Amino acid sequence: MKLVISFTIVVILQSVSLYGQDCSCEDEFMFVKNYIENNYAGFADKVNDETLPLYNEHTERLLQKSSNLTKESYCWVLINRWLDFFKDGHIQVRSNFASAEIDSVRLREMIAATEIIRLPDSRVEDLRDSDTVEGIYFNRDSTYKVAVARNENEFRDYAGIIVSSKSELWSEGQVKFELKQIDGNTYNAIVYYLYHQPYIETFVFDGFSFNEGGWTKAGKQVPVRSNARPPNVSSEIVSGDIFYIRIGTFEEWNALAIDSVITHHEEFLSTAPYWIIDLRGNGGGSDFSYRPIAPYLYTGPIEVIGADVLSTEENIINWSVLLDNPHIPDDLIQLLREILETMELHKGEFVSIVDDTTITLDEVRTYPRRVVVLVDGNCASSTENFLLAAMQSGKVTVMGQPTAGVLDYANMRSADFPCYSLRLDYATTRSRRIDVGMGVDNKGIAPDILLENDTDWIHEAVSFLNHDKK
């Protein structure tokens, strides 16, 4: 039987920011509110008779605040606060800024809109000796020297203020980033990039730097980054008979690379008794990306609980964009056409994209005999879908930490904000796991064997497989 694969793909749409136009935060807020209420597949579950009063109070309170905001970055933070109500990692607001669109008029407008705080020289000198989060910092290539000083408003506790800059686009006194403490040493950060466009990030302070040297205090040595981004796919043979493969993402553009690695090692894999599949940090992508791996793990029928898409005019348009995606296999393009035809006939309803089914393959491969899958709290979406199937295999043992729990509402699509250079990503499908009490959102998928973060996980996996040999 053919594998049924759902489309968990983020569609990137062209930016249509209206440069030179005054944007209203209240209008942008209402756009997001209306879009989510009409097109988000989880809205009816999240806003019900019990939660409606809380939702209305939450919405009205933040809507009132939006009427007084003129700063795009603060409006972005406010809208994120509103979206927090849904507790769904498949709803996001992201920058939709393209540097190629910058023209001299727009750039001058953005620079002119950047906040300026003048610090006396004596205050800058005092900050040099600070042993708190305040202080004088350099970014990694020393383009910017900033003073981080306490400067509070509703959206920040500290401001990172330019002391000197090697970039002609930034000058003394301009606010380069803003920090709002979440807890301990973790901060929500609004960072203004080269062209003064805002991004929302998380900063972690280790006593002398943010984010392992992204910004480091003057006089301190820039730490070596321990979390350098690994290749999207890499593999090696460990201990002679263990096939190790690390997959950094299941995004559709990485599907060919995954298939190439498996195909390259096909002769070895036909007799390799042990595998380690390292999925740490894999935030998901598209289910068809792990097709080459699935037959090796199969030991018996796989039960799949299906999902439904909310059919609306906007969702139909956004799903139609997938027809032009060159990374999607032809058989799934045909399935997509059928789904779109059904959606057209059932607007305002949920339409099945994956039926409840049992997947049966023609054979159980002798090898591998045992497979370890490594997962952590950054594993989400299609990676969790992979785990739900893999954990039904008698060969598979999952080791690590619980996953992110971002799967029940999925298949993200996008909508550009009317005015700001922002984009709303939202979930269009709803898993029927929810109806049988098997949802994973906000709790994740627990591993079979829990590993502590301060241990060598690959060593632990090899030890587990070596024990199996005895």
Image (cartoon, grey):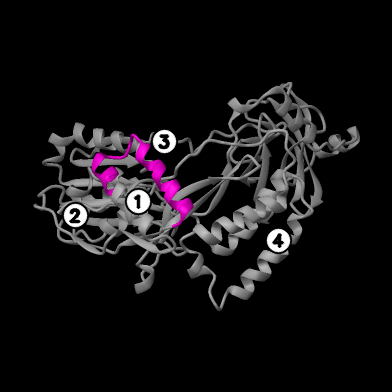
**Dot 2 and dot 3 residues touching (CB under 8 Å):** no
**Dot 1 and dot 2 residues touching (CB under 8 Å):** no
Residue underneath mark 2: 468
Dot in front, 2 or 3: 3
Q: Which mark is residue 230?
A: 3
Mark 3 Cα within 10 Å, few/some/many (few <14, many 20+)?
A: few
Q: Gap in Å between the C-alphas at discs 1 and 3?
A: 37 Å
Amino acid beneath label 1: Leu
Q: Main secondary structure of the magenta part?
A: helix
Earlier along the polypeptide chain: callout 2 or callout 3?
A: 3
Earlier along the polypeptide chain: callout 1 or callout 3?
A: 3
Earlier along the polypeptide chain: callout 4 or callout 3?
A: 4
Element marked by disc 2: helix
Question: In which quadrant is the N terminus drawn?
Answer: bottom left
Q: Gap in Å between the C-alphas at discs 4 and 1?
A: 36 Å
Residue underneath mark 1: 340
Residue at (23% x, 43% y) in the render: 331
Amino acid beneath label 3: Pro
Element marked by disc 4: helix
Q: Gap in Å between the C-alphas at discs 4 and 2?
A: 56 Å
The single residue placed furthest to the front in the displayed view is 345
Q: Which mark is residue 62?
A: 4
Q: Position of residue 91 (x, y in %)?
A: 52, 54
Residue bounds of the magenta highlight? 312-335
**Dot 4 and dot 3 residues touching (CB under 8 Å):** no
Please name whichever residue, 52 or 238, is drawn nearer the observer in this view of the structure: 52
Amino acid beneath label 4: Leu
